[in-house]
Image (cartoon, helix red, strand yellow):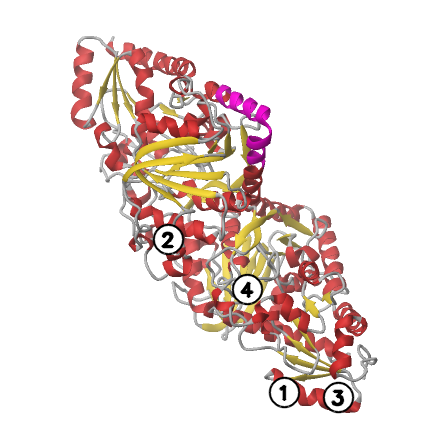
């Protein structure tokens, strides 16, 4: 069997395309690769229109099944290939885009999916929302990126003094003057024109971490990540705790574009004894795993998540979370493995809709609940090692149920069964 | 008893806020003066120094005299011989107690404890504000929660109980003002200018054939035109339906238009973030996008009215197409129009994050209109589940001081649960349509509660009690010993 995979970010370009549209689909493909290799030969496609049908034709000629897995939003998935095409997409809103806005029928994902006839997404929430519009029998599989098995190599340690070394930029907010980033100053200058704090540049970094470390990995320009509330609630909850650290690893190609706004938010919180650290770096696997080891809790305050790879990685390796329970996180966040942050619906836009009109719902994070979650989780990390251990175990187990290779394998097999029957008929 | 009343020209340093707060200072002064006239002589002064000769004359005549400063404590005149009482609303979680803001450094009154200690006592507009003043000043500090007195135009309608809204009922709105009407704004999502680079897939002509619309998907149909009553259906020459309008504030003209179905009214400012107008509008638009007989009447009291229409058109465009209707009245209507507007309303709605007073909610409630509102800060004094659909809110959202540097969070207010607001819109609509007895019972309790808290008799008693309290309190006594004659007549008709 031949499995063709495609996303718009080539593997080699990922570093320079962080924060660009659909960059995170490349991370998803990387996680799917071991699974796909189990089922056949995988070919990474650079140009679907040129390559897919040529390969498919040769497969048909030798009666070898061939599938095209397009890791892109449905609107950007090729529609008229002869090769059976399965869109693999992430989504995190209450409804699928169902308007052909800007006069483009492809912007109506319901039409695209109806034509393609099947799909893979990463959460039961989106699978359910899709079936709600395309019918209860619409073949959509919920297959999260199967990364759990990979994370079992990393065993959770989080106590004592830890050391983190990497190449990149690290700003420890307790060591820099934040006054140039005060809100009233940034009102008169675009924040991206404000330089980084003096002496802060890319280079070798060695960082000591101790106490309770909360880590979040996100692109600050992605409005869904809702990072302002993350910073303020952390600082408010643990303002007096010298041994509490909020570590924000920024997934964006240009630090200058994102760091000043983050520093403004930290400045706005006033005097702090707790520590906020910004890391802007493309970490080696080793450094990335060290960061997980240094972490006490994985952190998420999003308005919605398609699956949230970093949260899944951290929890798979036994880090309990501070996170809301909505969208994809309904599948793996609960009170046993996380300090659940309350949220409720609010009006939202489909992020790719250039009109930014209100057509959907997202989740509003309850600030007070987030503050409490920080305080409770800090207390548990400091004073209730048994509870922490149990939560860590539960996190591992919960993510095993969500994104282990076993789970993904059986669901993918099921999806292929339907596909192969179809193809066999077609070839016959 | 002599009441000297004064409202300073500027409450807050920030220009964008000054207009509205000034106006509230004067409105508050007028509202209280109406009641104070029943207790004694009221003299309005333009600057606090004008109070001194009046005061000294009272001293000679052995009459009681107090200067009421309708402004927050940092604007309290503190160098006068005349006893001073600030009257103010406060919606934040604490009062400023530390002079941390750069722009406060030269004035010790920004530590409100200092300013309040120089006053004979304080009147605040909610029990929330009373409690936080007491927390800072001690339980013995004379502070009274006296609500914003009901508007004079709110008539006691107990004898002519309001007609219940029913299917097909259309109340008439007649008003002279600038009125924006969502049905005359030319709302069109496709007309929205998209600044951002459009990353959506390019148009492919064959998509139209390969991707036919799915029949089973319910779609919003823009059928507003059919619902839109014809201009001048009343036949009056002097008035008309709201004019077509776009981004600019519509001209001031006589408007006469029928309001469809269930009418929700909110009085708010778009410049004051705590009024949270976006939640009011998006919650309404989302709840009733396919419901033609729901109307939202926004009375917009704002220092920057010119910019409000553009903000509203922008937000409504994002919600369109809408079958429900949103009408914005820019500027406070006259007393008679305000009364008529209350009468045309089915529910008063607020999604406030922090309320300094429950002024407008009380006016509507007193006329038997149930409210949809959160039960915190000043609203908390009136909003209860028996007479309101309570919108869930959560305390703790960090905020800057409104009159400080705006750089660092020093206090907090409440977060609104938007989902709960939408549920309240749906439920209120169903109650008004299908549960007339429930609706009437809510209205009755709303009326009783608002009158008990904000009616003229209640306010008069509160003020009298406060005047007695400051006489007996140490502060006034101290003031008295130093500068003033016996105050035994305080609180009595002089």
Q: Which residue lies at the image location 51% right of the left edge and 34% below the top edge? A: A322
- Look at the image and give the residue range highlighted in magenta: A376-397
The Cα–Cα distance between marks 2 and 3, rounded to whole angstroms, is 65 Å
Mark 4 sits on what residue? B99
Q: Where is residue A143 in the image (x, y as percent from the top left)?
A: 40, 21
Specify the label residue B188 is tagged with.
Answer: 2
Per the picture, the main secondary structure of the magenta-coloured stretch is: helix
First along the sequence among labels 1 and 3: 1
Specify the label residue B58 is tagged with.
Answer: 3
Share a chain, discs 4 and 2? yes
The Cα–Cα distance between marks 3 and 4, rounded to whole angstroms, is 36 Å
For label 2, the crowd category at 10 Å Cα-Cα, with few meaning under 14, some 14 to 19 and many 20 or more, is some
Q: Which of marks 3 and 4 is in front?
A: 4
The Cα–Cα distance between marks 1 and 2, rounded to whole angstroms, is 56 Å
SS for tag 4? Answer: loop
Specify the label residue B37 is tagged with.
Answer: none
SS for tag 3? Answer: helix
First along the sequence among labels 1 and 4: 1
Subunit bearing disc 3: B
Q: Where is residue A119 in the image (x, y as percent from the top left)?
A: 36, 24
């Amino acid at each position: 069997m031949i499995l063709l995979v495609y996303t718009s970010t080539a593997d080699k370009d990922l570093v320079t395309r962080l924060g660009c549209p659909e960059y995170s689909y490349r991370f998803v493909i990387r996680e799917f690769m071991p699974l796909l290799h189990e089922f056949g030969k995988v070919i990474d496609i650079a140009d679907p229109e040129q390559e897919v049908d040529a390969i498919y034709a040769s497969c048909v000629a030798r009666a070898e099944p061939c599938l095209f897995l397009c890791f892109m939003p449905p609107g950007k998935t090729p529609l008229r290939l002869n090769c059976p095409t399965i869109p693999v997409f992430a989504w995190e809103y209450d409804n699928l885009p169902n308007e052909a806005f800007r006069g483009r029928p492809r912007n109506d994902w319901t039409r695209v999916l109806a034509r393609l006839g099947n799909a893979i997404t990463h959460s039961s929430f989106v699978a359910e929302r899709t079936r709600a519009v395309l019918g209860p029998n619409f073949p959509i599989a919920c297959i999260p990126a199967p990364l759990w098995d990979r994370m079992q190599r990393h065993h959770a340690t989080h106590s004592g003094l830890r050391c983190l070394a990497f190449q990149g930029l690290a700003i420890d907010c307790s060591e820099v003057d934040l006054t140039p980033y005060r809100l009233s100053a940034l009102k008169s200058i675009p924040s991206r024109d404000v330089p980084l704090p003096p002496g802060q540049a890319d280079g070798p970094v060695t960082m000591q971490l101790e106490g309770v470390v909360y880590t979040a990995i996100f692109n600050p320009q992605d409005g869904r990540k809702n990072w302002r509330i993350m910073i303020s609630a952390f600082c408010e909850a643990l303002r007096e705790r010298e041994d509490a650290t909020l570590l924000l690893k920024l997934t964006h190609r240009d630090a200058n574009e994102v760091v000043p706004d983050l520093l403004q938010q930290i400045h706005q919180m006033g005097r702090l004894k707790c520590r906020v650290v910004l890391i802007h770096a493309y970490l080696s696997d080793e450094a990335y795993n060290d960061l997980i080891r240094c972490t006490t809790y994985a952190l998420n305050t999003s308005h919605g998540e398609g699956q949230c790879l970093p949260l899944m990685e951290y929890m798979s390796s036994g880090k309990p979370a501070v996170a809301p329970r909505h969208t994809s996180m309904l599948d793996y966040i609960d009170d046993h493995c996380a300090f659940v942050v309350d949220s409720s619906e609010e009006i939202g836009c489909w992020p790719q809709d250039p009109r930014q009109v209100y057509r959907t719902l997202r989740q509003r994070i309850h600030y007070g609940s987030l503050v409490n979650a920080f305080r409770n989780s800090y207390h548990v990390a400091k004073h209730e090692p048994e509870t922490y251990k149990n939560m860590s175990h539960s996190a591992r187990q919960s993510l095993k149920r969500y994104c282990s290779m076993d789970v993904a394998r059986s669901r993918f097999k099921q999806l292929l069964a339907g596909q192969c029957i179809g193809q066999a008929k077609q070839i016959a | 008893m002599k009441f000297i009343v004064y409202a300073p020209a500027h409450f807050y340093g920030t220009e964008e806020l000054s207009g509205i707060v000034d106006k509230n200072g004067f409105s508050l002064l007028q509202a209280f003066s109406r009641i104070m006239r029943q207790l004694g002589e009221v003299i309005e002064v333009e600057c606090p120094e004008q109070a001194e000769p009046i005061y000294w004359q009272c001293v000679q005549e052995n009459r009681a005299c107090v200067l009421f400063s309708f402004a927050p404590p940092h604007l309290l005149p503190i160098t006068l011989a005349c006893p001073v009482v600030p009257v103010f609303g406060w919606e934040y979680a604490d009062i400023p107690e530390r002079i941390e803001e750069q722009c406060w450094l030269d004035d010790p009154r920004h530590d409100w404890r200092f300013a309040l200690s120089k006053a004979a006592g304080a009147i605040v507009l909610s029990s929330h504000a009373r409690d936080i003043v007491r927390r800072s000043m001690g339980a013995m500090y004379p502070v009274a929660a006296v609500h914003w007195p009901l508007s004079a135009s709110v008539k006691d309608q107990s004898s002519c109980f309001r007609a219940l809204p029913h299917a097909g009922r259309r109340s008439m709105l007649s008003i002279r003002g600038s009125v924006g009407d969502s049905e005359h704004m030319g709302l069109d999502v496709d007309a929205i200018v998209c600044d951002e680079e459009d990353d959506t897939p390019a148009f492919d002509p064959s998509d139209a054939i390969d991707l036919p619309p799915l029949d089973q998907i319910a779609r919003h149909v823009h059928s507003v035109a059919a619902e839109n009553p014809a201009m001048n259906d009343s036949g009056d020459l002097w008035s008309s339906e709201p004019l077509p309008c776009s981004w600019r504030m519509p001209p001031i003209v006589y408007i006469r238009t029928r309001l469809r179905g269930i009418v929700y009214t909110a009085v708010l400012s778009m410049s004051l973030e705590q009024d949270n107008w976006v939640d009011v509008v998006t919650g309404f638009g989302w709840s009733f996008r396919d419901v033609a007989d729901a109307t939202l009447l926004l009375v917009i009291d704002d220092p920057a009215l010119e910019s409000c229409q553009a903000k509203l058109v922008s937000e409504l465009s994002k919600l369109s197409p809408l079958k429900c209707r949103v009408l914005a009245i820019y500027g406070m209507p006259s007393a008679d129009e305000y009364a008529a507007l209350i009468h045309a309303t089915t529910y008063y709605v607020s999604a406030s994050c922090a309320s300094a007073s429950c002024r407008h909610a009380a006016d509507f409630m007193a006329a038997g209109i149930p409210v949809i509102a959160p039960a915190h800060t000043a609203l908390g004094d009136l909003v209860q589940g028996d007479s309101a659909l309570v919108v869930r809110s959560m305390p703790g959202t960090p905020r800057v001081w409104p009159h400080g540097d705006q750089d660092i969070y020093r206090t907090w207010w409440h977060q609104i649960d938007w989902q709960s607001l939408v549920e309240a819109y749906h439920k209120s609509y169903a109650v008004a349509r299908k549960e007339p007895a429930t609706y009437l019972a809510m209205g009755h309790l709303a009326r009783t509660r608002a009158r008990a808290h904000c009616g003229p008799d209640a306010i008069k008693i509160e003020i009298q009690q406060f005047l007695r309290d400051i006489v007996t309190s140490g502060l006034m006594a101290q003031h008295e010993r130093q500068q003033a004659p016996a105050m035994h007549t305080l609180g009595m008709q002089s």
